[in-house]
Image: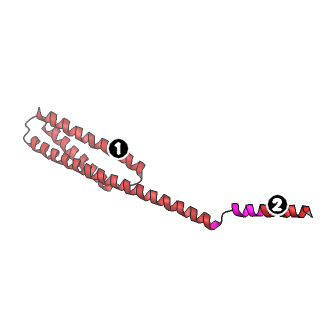
Amino acid sequence: MKKPIVIMAFASLFLSLSLTSCSSPESDVSEAQEEVNEAQNELDVANMELEKDIKKFRTATFEKIEVNNVRISELKENIKNDKSALKSIHEKQVIDLQARNNDLKMRLNNYKGEGEDKWEDFKKEFEHDMNEIGSSLKDLTVSNTK
């Protein structure tokens, strides 16, 4: 008589433990949905920050492009009055710089946000190209005034 009671006690204990340790599929789904919602919110915040960074970069870069355009216009005027043998070379250099400057403007206008890693790569390459144009403009100005 003692043996069946002990077996019954262990069976009920095992059954109650197994029932309480199992989670229902509904709670698993709700937990997964919460995790998905959190991840989506984090992604939305990251995308908004990326868009702000892109917008800020575009604004600052368009200003630099316009400064380059002014410098290019000034160089064109100076070249018109240039009597040196380098006049045609300077004209070609200015035309090349203007084309590169316009190309940068188009690249920036056409850029679509494609994730933070690609944005950082684009920005690094773009800033390098922008600095090259700035250096070329300075070099041309220096050689043009001699």
Give the amino acid at mark 1.
Answer: Lys
**In percent of the image, x 31 and y 54: which residue is there?**
55
Give the main secondary structure of the magenta stretch: helix
Task: Read off the residue under disc 1.
Answer: 124
Marks 1 and 2, the one that precedes in the sequence: 2
The spot of residue 42 in percent (x, y) is 45, 57
Give the amino acid at mark 2.
Answer: Phe
**In percent of the image, x 87 and y 64: which residue is there?**
5
Please determine whether, in this image, residue 107 is positioned above or below residue 84: below
Residue mark closest to the camera, 1 vs 2: 2
The spot of residue 48 in percent (x, y) is 38, 57
Marking on residue 10? 2
Q: Within the image, what quadrant is residue 87 found in?
A: top left
Q: Left of 125 or right of it: where is 138?
A: left
Few, some or many residues within 10 Å of mark 2 (<14, 14–19, 20+): few
The spot of residue 70 in percent (x, y) is 15, 47
